[in-house]
Structure formats: C-alpha cells, structure tokens
Amino acid sequence: MTMTSITPQNLIALDQQHVWHPYASMDKPPPAYPVVGAHGVRLTLIDGQEIIDGMASWWCAVHGYNHPHLNQAMKVQIEDMSHVMFGGITHAPAVTLAKRLVDLTPAGLDKVFFSDSGSVAVEVAIKMALQYWHAKAQPDKNRMLTIRNGYHGDTFGAMAVCDPVNGMHGLFASVLPQHYFVDAPPMGFDRPLQAGDLDELEATMSKHHNNIAALILEPIVQGAGGMRFYSPQWLSGAAKLCKQYNILLIADEIATGFGRSGALFACDHANVAPDIMCLGKAITGGTMSFAATLATSEIATSISRGEASCFMHGPTFMANPLACAVANASLDLLESNDWKNQVDELNKGLTRLLTPAVSLPYVEDVRVLGAIGVIQVTQAVDLGIIQKMFVAEGIWVRPFGKLVYVMPPFIMSQEDLATLCNGMLRVLERYFGQDYATN
Ligand SMILES: *Cc1c(COP(=O)(O)O)cnc(C)c1O
C-alpha cells in the first residue's frame, strides 16, 4: 500500500508541504488548525479542544454545524441521486428551490441560474448584463460600473470589479477588463443622505452611460473589501440613477443574503428590486458550495431573443441535486427558526458587548449591523500571532488587516456570544495593551 497515512503527528507537516490555503504562502506556509468535527456553534480541534466559531465559516453556517435537518435532507437526496447533468434534464430539488427563491427575493426576479460558487454567480451576472445589451443592439454598453471597497470573488471577471487596491489589480492589469469605479458610499447604515453623496456616481453615469452595462455592488454591507455598512437611502438613490441612465443594477447578495444584515436580503432595507441578484455562501446553510443568479424576465427574454438565442453558460455541476436539496432544507430552517428574531437578538448582544470598545486607544471604530460585529483597530494585526491567541481563548476569529470581526451562526446563544465577544476583547487588550499602556 502506497497511500500516505495521515496521523495527527504528520497532518500539519503534510498540509504545509502539499496543500494550498486561501491567500496563503506556500513558501513559508502558516500552520493551519486541524479540525476533526463541528457541532452547533463549536469546532472540535484535533487535540479535542472545542472552540466557539465566530465566523460561521465565512458567512455560511447560519444554522450551525451538523444540523440534523440539513444532514437528513442530504442523506435522503443521496439515496435518490447525488448528481445528474442539467442539460436536457430537470429535477424537483432544483425546481422547488428556484420557485422558493423567486418568492423570497425582491419582485421581478423570476429566472434562476444555478451555479457552483459565488464567483461563478458573479461571472454569470456580468455575462447576463453584457448579453442583454448585445441583444438590445447596444453592444457598446459593455463595461461595469462599481464602487470602491467592493469584493465580488476571485475569478477574472469578478476580480475586475473588486476594489482595485485590495484586489491587487496592478498584478493583473494587463489581462483585467477595465471598468468604471467611484468612491464607496459614505459609511453608516443610519447616516442620512446628504447633498453630494451621489454626485460622483451620477457624474460617471451621465458621462459614460453609453458604455455602461450595469452597476454592480454589494448592497448595504461591503464585506471582504472593508466590512463597511452604508445607508439604504444611498442604495435607493443609486437604484433610481440606474433607471434614469438605462443601466442595469446587479446586487451581489452573496454575503448578505438570507438574513445576515437584519433583512432577508440587504436590498429589502431599501425596497430596491435589482435587475440581477447573486446568491451564494449561506444558501446551503454552510454545507455545500452552491450559488444562484436571479434575473428579471425582461433580461432573460431579451437574451434569449438575441444573436445566440440562449444564455451562453452551463456549468457541469449546474443545479447539483444534493446542493439544491440542502438549500431547500436551509430555507425550511430559516422559516421555522424565525431568522429575524435570531438576528435581532444577536444584534442586541453584539451591540451591548462590542460598542464599549470604541473608547479603547487601539480601537478606531466599532460597528454592528444585523448579525455582523466589526472592531476596526488602529494597526493591521499579525494573523500568525493573533490567531494563536484567539484559539487559546477558546474562540475562532479570523481578522484581516485592521478588521477584527464576527458573524456568528444565527443559533448562537447569548452565553456563547458573550464568551466570543469578551474573548475577542481580551485578546485585543493583550495584543495591543503593551503598546498603549497608559499606567
Ligand atoms: C464570498 C463572496 C463572493 C465569492 O464567492 P465564492 O463562493 O468565494 O466564489 C462574491 N461576492 C461576495 C459579496 C462575497 O462575499
């Protein structure tokens, strides 16, 4: 037998030798924590230690891990079929899910394209916008307009609309399509719209609308590009400008969808109905990689009457039945668990536990929206050092740069939330305390 056997002793070494991790060096690989199980809001490390997960595996595990209803849905579906091609074939899990998504999302989003990850859902959205204007005999409308500090995924089309600095556009400048960027909206969910707030957006639209296919943005919450919150008024203002200048609106709800921001979809805060919407991350309750792009009938029909007579996309694993089945089960739980109440309770807890930190000398800003809590510190943290401190504290928090943030599973109890937030504050105190000691 030639297969290498994995033991607790050699697991980390083999991992560092062979396995790439997200945005990680393969020259000096940082150690990763072996996880052997996950239940509720806890991850079990290989040495048996249980840590409280503040990340919900990057916005996904909204119902917690190993949920019996999700597991059961997958087991039942496996017995029928884990997968079948979607070309020329259909199945109940996909059709049921499409109908439910159409019913839950803002009015007009009637046509659902399933794919396998968020980045692909964004590629699909961009391609839909381009094919739409091509079909409308306006092929020069082939650029995107977007706001700085955005994050839309790591594939080339998606990367081209990510923040140019965070997204390291310089590295790929020669291959990335060039799009239009305007400054991110002013911060603050509750900030009243002020004169001038939409000026740059309007000026860009007014000057370049003949070349702009769509405005793509993350509504209300800009996630991985800066954990920034902005106001529903700005969003609805931007949506109105899109109509005025004949520009499509693509709402990337991959991070915000399914309740995270305190509304089922962040667009709902502003009663905005986009032309195209991307969903992913929490769609399967954190169990499987899956995504969807929804579009209006006007877009779908126009594309289908264009030169190609169809939308030019079709992933191999499109509408994977196992993923559809567990996505349906996750929607059951959102309804039966009363997601709104869960998120509101987490919001109160996060606000109470984190807001006092704003007075600390090493804290620049504290912001909470829905079940998202962000502490922005004065200096970027060293992930290698701080990660160990969080684990020693019994919690899982994965900051980036100056942003130390949590978005817990919706099922987290107030007691676990307090352990998580207080642990986070203790770690920051130890991490920065020395430098800021006032005596
Ligand atoms: C995570 C994310 C993506 C990319 O999704 P992947 O599944 O990682 O490809 C796109 N847009 C937003 C807003 C995201 O948060």
Image (spheres, helix red, strand yellow):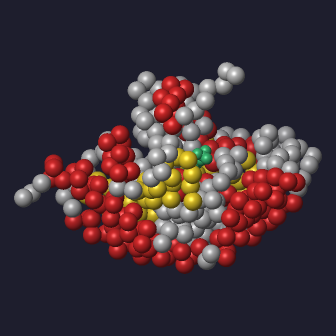
- The picture places residue 281, in percent across and down from the top left corner, at 61, 54
Residue at 63 percent across and 59 percent down: it is 66
Determine the residue located farthest toward the right in the rendered image: 88
Count of numbered marks: 0
The image quadrant that residue 106 belongs to is: bottom right
| On screen, residue 103 above or below 318 | below
Viewer-proximal residue, 379 or 426?
Answer: 426
Asked if residue 203 lies left or right of residue 127, the reply is left
Report if residue 127 is visible in the image: yes
Asked if residue 216 lies left or right of residue 429, the reply is right
Viewer-proximal residue, 124 or 435?
Answer: 435
- The picture places residue 133, in percent across and down from the top left corner, at 72, 46
Which corner quadrant holds the N terminus? top right
Determine the residue located farthest toward the front in the rendered image: 1
- The picture places residue 215, in percent across and down from the top left corner, at 58, 52
Residue at 71 percent across and 70 percent down: it is 332
Report if residue 215 is visible in the image: no
Residue at 92 percent across and 49 percent down: it is 89
| On screen, residue 242 above or below 320 | below
The image quadrant that residue 87 belongs to is: top right
Viewer-proximal residue, 253 or 1?
Answer: 1
- The picture places residue 156, in percent across and down from the top left corner, at 60, 35
Residue at 22 percent across and 65 percent down: it is 359
The image quadrant that residue 5 belongs to is: top right
Which corner quadrant holds the C terminus? bottom left
Determine the residue located farthest toward the left in the rendered image: 439
